[in-house]
Every structure is written in C-alpha cells, then in structure tokens.
Amino acid sequence: MWTAFLTEQEMTQNVLQTNILESEAIYIFREVVAQFEKPVLLFSGGKDSITLVRLAQKAFFPSKIPFPLLHIDTGHNFPETIAFRDKLVEKLGLELIVRNVQDNIDAGKVTEETGKYASRNMLQTETLLDAIEEFGFDACIGGARRDEEKARAKERIFSVRDDFGQWDEKNQRPEVFDMLNGKINLGQNVRVFPISNWTELDVWSYIEKEQIEIPSIYFAHTRATFLRDGLIWSADDEVVYREEDEKIEERVIRFRTVGDMSCTAAVLSNAYDIASVVQEIRQSTISERGARIDDKRSEAAMEKRKQQGYF
Amino acid sequence: MDVLKIATAGSVDDGKSTLIGRILYDTQSLTDDKLEAIERNSKRKGFDYLDFSLATDGLVAEREQGITIDVAHIYFSTQNRSYIIADTPGHEEYTRNMVTGASTSQVAIILVDARKGVIEQTSRHFYINNLLRVKDIVFAVNKMDLVDYSEEKYLALFDEIQALVAKTTYKEQNITCIPVSALQGDNVVAKSSNMTWYSGKTLVEHLEQIQPQDVYEEAQTRFPIQTVIRPKTSEYHDFRGYAGKLYGGDIAVGDEVTILPSGTQSTVKEIFFYDQKFEKAGRGSSLTLTLTNDVNVSRGDMIVKTSEQPKVEKELSATICWMDKKPLRPNTKYSLQHGVNNVLAKIVDVETIEEANFSEEKTAVSQLQLNEIGEIQLKLSKPLFFDSYKKNKYNGGFILIDLQSNTTAGVGFIK
Ligand SMILES: Nc1nc2c(ncn2[C@@H]2O[C@H](COP(=O)(O)OP(=O)(O)O)[C@@H](O)[C@H]2O)c(=O)[nH]1
C-alpha cells in the first residue's frame, strides 16, 4: 500500500510498508542538515511545529536533533503554550532560542497596532529577521502546509528569501522530482517546509497515532469568553481587546490553531481527547484559518505578509 | 489512507481551475468559509454562477489577470483515499512549471476544450507527460455544455485524441478519455444526465480506482546517502547509520551490497525506521541502514545491490528541458544535482531542439532557450552512477544549477 504514514500495527511487522508523507518529511529534514550550515526550527508551540519536532527526532535517531529551536515570542502567546514549550525542550534536551517582539517595541523599532483588531502578527517578521541576522541562520524550518491557505499552496519546499526575508513568488525555483536545490547566494536564506503536503487532518491523525503530547488548549475546556463578529474570543487575558458591551460568558471551547490570543478565536467543542478532536476535524465545515482574523483582512492578506517576510 | 498524486494540464481557459474547484465542491471538500468567499467574489465580479477557479488561483497577479501562473497544490480526500493535485499553468512560457507539477505526479489530467479539439498545446502537454513517463493520462474533454453535449462531436474528438496517442513510443501508460462539463458538473463526480450516451466512469470514479503507486516506478534498488548518522553517545558509541530514501526496489537484512563510487562490498546489518528495526523495506521509505563492516561512506555515495549495478561514467547524453531565462550554451559549466549528489558539469554540445509534438523533427541548434527541449552532451568532474531515465526515474533524472544565480536552470533525462 502507498500510505501517508504507518499504523501502529504496521510498525510492528517485519517488513516496513511505505509511508510517503512521513518519509518525505524525514527526507527533507536530512537534506536541510546536509545542505545548510546553520539551520533552525521555527517553533511556535502549535501542533504543526510540535509535529516537526517528532519528525526531526525520527530523521536523526539515534542522534539528537542537530539544530536549535527558535521561538519568536509575541508576548501574546497562551501561557499554556509557553509552559508546554519549556517542558518539551527540557524533555528532549534541545537548545531553545527565544526572541521577544516586546524588545523591538520597547526599543521603538516597531509600533504596535491599537484598537479592536490590533495584533502583533505583523511585528513578528521584524523580530524573526533580526534573529536570522544575529545568528546567521541559513535555513529556517517551518510547519506551514499548502492546504492552509491559497498563497501557501504555491510555496516551494525550499523557498528562497532575500536579505529582507522577501518571497519573490513569481520567480520561484522549479522543484522537480524530490530533488531539493539549497544553493544560495550571500545574504539569502531558505525557508523549509517539511510538511508542505500534509493536510490538517493528516497532522491530527499523526498526533493521534504517535501519541504526541500537545498543549491543553487544543482540547475542550471551560473558559471565560466573549463574542465578536460571530467568533468566540478568550476573555481571560488583558491582551485581548474587549469593548465594554461585549459580554463575558463561560463556554466550553477549544482552539483549533494556536496563534496569538489576540487573533485566535475558539470553537465550541466537546472534544476532550485526541480521538474526538480527529473526529471533529473530519466533520468540520470551517477551515482551520477561518478562525484566524489576520487572514480575513483582505483576500490578499497572506500573500502580502509573505512578500514582506512573514513566515 | 493511500495517496494519489495528480497534475493538471491544458491550455489557458480550458477550465483547469474550474474543474478542480468543481471536484472540491462535488466531493464536499470546500469548507463553508471558503465557499462563502467564492460566492462573495463571484458576485462581486458580476457572475451569475460560482467561479470555482477562485478556489485555486492563489496569487494576486493571477486573480487580476484571471490566469494561473504558478503550480498550486490542492488537497482533498474521499472515503477511499487522499488526493494531491498540482494545478499547473497552461501558458507555453510556463512549461517549466508544468514539468515541475508532472514530475511528482502519477496521474495527469489533460484538458481539451470540446470546441477547439486537439491543439498544439494538447500535443505539447501529452509529449511532456510522456517525456516524464507519467503513468496514467486522462483526457478530460471539457465544456461539453457548449457543444450541446453532442455525442458526435465527442466521437470526432475521441478520434483526434487516439491519433495523438498513436504517436508516442511510451506504451506502458494507461490512457482514458472522459467528456465533462467542469462548470455544470457533468461527469465530474456524478454521472451526467445530459450525456446518457456515455457509459464510462466519471472523472472521480476513474481516479478512485487507479492503484496509487510511487511516481518513481519499480526498478533496481538504489539507496543514495543523504547524511551519515554518528551519535557518539555512550549507548550508541560505534553506531554509523547511513540515512537516505530507498528508490526502485527493496532491501533486506543480509543483502550483499556495493557502495559507489568506491566499489566497496558489504552486507546490510540493520534497517531502521526511527527506533524500530525491520527485516525488509520497500521503495519510498526514508531509512537508516547499518552495514556489517566499517566502510568509508559520505553524502552523495550510493548503496546498491551487488547484483544490480548502475552505469558509472563521466560523460552523459541527455534530453533537457530548459527552465532559465539565460539560454543554455555549449562550453558553459553548471552544478549537476543527481538526487543528493552534486558534481560539476560542462556542457560539451547542445545538439538539437525537439518540437515537443511528436513530429520527430529535430533541428540542429547551438543553444536552448527558456522552455525549449533538446538533446545535449555533458562531461562531468567526477563519475556519476546512473541508469537511463526510462529504466529508473530516480537514477536517470538530474537538474542543472546555475553557478552564479544558484537557480535550478534545467531538468535532464539521461538517455
Ligand atoms: N461553459 C463552460 N465554461 C467553462 C467550463 N469550464 C470552464 N469554463 C469557463 O472557462 C473559463 C476559463 O476557466 P478556468 O478554469 O479559469 O481555466 P484555466 O485557465 O484552465 O484554469 C472561465 O470563464 C470558466 O467559467 C465548462 O465546462 N463549460
């Protein structure tokens, strides 16, 4: 069979079955380490980057993951995500680099948006580019998937960026077969997407099958929330802007993606464990990014941010 | 779940994006918010129907010009399996993107406009799919609604397609022809009530029963080494694992192998996938092998079964599809990437250019321009271990990388 990845049962047989998505991701990780001098894994604490960590473990076993993790902390992360991140890094003995968006704000390098839809999403780019320069990273590995969004559907697996982190979408290198050309000029770096060809459901099924731990906010829990524009927002934290007439109510919810608290809406859910999350995703009629306000600003929102160096 | 990889091809406006949008819609793969966006934008543009091409054309320039420029990847699944579609552009100047999409696909859907029939682009796209040896080809005769769903018209077109297919020398492929209307949804997922004269499968029914396979077909075993894993921890002090992806055939513990280019012989000791050991593994998996004796192996080397040796040579002749604005000229140097191995290559001769339409007309030329296909001779700085592309897709394909710009300038198929 030509399957995406192996089931528990297939793993215990003597003959290894083909597992194309998992093998593709492992292949990509190995190419990164062989072709680049200073790779880094961009770690957001979300399910996609957690999946990347597992795949990287598999790619280099019995060696440790041979590159550090970089977290661009907006200061608006869910506290659960940060706690999870620290625990994971400690458990696997990984090196973690954290750079804070707040530092750039304090230094007056960037100005924060204000008002109802304010988000620090755009500001991450600046901090990321600074970190790339500071450490001289030549390859940044990320968990973006082509099924997430229309502009991402056009992304290469090795995506070359210039000094300013810009994506020249009309002039991308052809990627033929599974050959990856990681040769770059001075000042360029590459964004690498090992799970490009995975769908949201693939990721969730993999997390279930591998029994990968993920932050608790992905599961149903009771939270103080309020409604805006038909979406449910967390009212727990002051970073989420709330108007006085937006009434707080307790709801049983979970988060489907884990971005900033200020731009990630929750969904009503009774999925308390991974099996019911997978079931819920299977039946869902709203796309993952439907709950991310940052993409809704305009039809071209994602492409614009990418050209400017957003991940 | 198994996975089927598909590429689309066809001229501009033949309806590729519409067809994909229709497939997504009819298989209930479009989520409510995406569907709403399509409805909103269709209305804004003043259409009285749903413009499904909006589901796939992801770049602003594409939406402005209403054309597809770059390969977009689209994902959907049925009860049966997952599908990955590479939606490739139809413009001739974007041939390189078509090659890109087709190179990772097992199935190609070539659209033919029922009003126009087989045109130069159809022939070209079929030719490129044959060059790449794409196994399953579906000719979707689209816009049947605009020819009154006429059987007569379809049969005439069917003959034209048969005549085109007769020209190829690649006979190991499966060819299917289906009359559809992407816009109206006839024979895409559901059987058309407008074409009761057609008794064959609908497009998606047909895709559902194709047996998914590796795009790299079954061939002799090739295990190119990406990196050597040496943990040097106390537990794995002497561990030396050769990490790579297996192509062509299978490998088992105890197999006698040869390491190229050194020619050193050894035996497979263990096969790891992550922390689990297996007795045997099939092609398509990323593995870590250990060998019974210590050998000097590094990235770019290749492990093969001793009984199945590839060619080892410093000179090559190949068919090349040129992808760079800077033309390919004799006496220039490129970096040649063959899987995970890089060598320096000198272009000895650019011999002929092919018309890419089965005319077998070969014109002598001195250079190749962007999107042209031709024959070249190369000399390499080090011997390469290869097979002909026809025998082994993985081990017979390469790319040329420009030494200044570092861009992927061309893709080659070894004779
Ligand atoms: N009448 C009719 N029009 C179609 C059909 N398929 C596509 N079209 C129209 O043909 C035009 C080009 O379609 P599009 O999908 O953008 O083509 P692409 O350039 O191949 O992606 C659009 O105006 C579509 O609405 C069809 O089956 N019937």
Image (cartoon, rainbow, N blue to C red):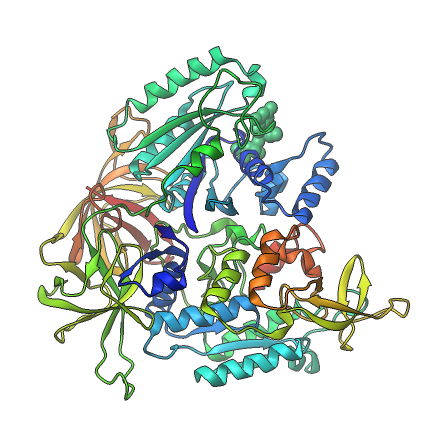
Left or right: residue A109 compared with residue A175: right
Residue A290, quarter of picture: bottom right
Image quadrant of ligand 1 equals top right
Residue A23, quarter of picture: bottom left
Q: Residue at x 47, y 10 (%)?
A: B152
Q: Where is residue B298? Give x, y as percent.
A: 21, 70
Image quarter (top left, top right, bottom left or bottom right) of the C terminus of chain B: top left
Q: Where is residue A88? Give x, y as percent.
A: 51, 80
Furthest toward the right, the residue is A245
Q: Where is residue B170? Give x, y as percent.
A: 25, 32
Any part of residue A309 in sight: no
Position above or below: B263 against B82: below
Q: Residue at x 68, y 60 (%)?
A: A292
Left or right: residue B58 compared with residue A253: left
Furthest toward the top, the residue is B152
- Marker count (numbered): 0
| Most foreground residue, B112 or B399 | B112
Any part of residue A119 in sight: yes
Q: Residue at x 32, y 77 (%)?
A: A62
| Most foreground residue, A129 or B35 | B35
| Most foreground residue, A143 or B344 | A143
Left or right: residue B357 compared with residue A310: left
Position above or below: A15 against B235: above
Q: Where is residue B52? Give x, y as percent.
A: 61, 37
Q: Residue at x 37, y 26 (%)?
A: B123
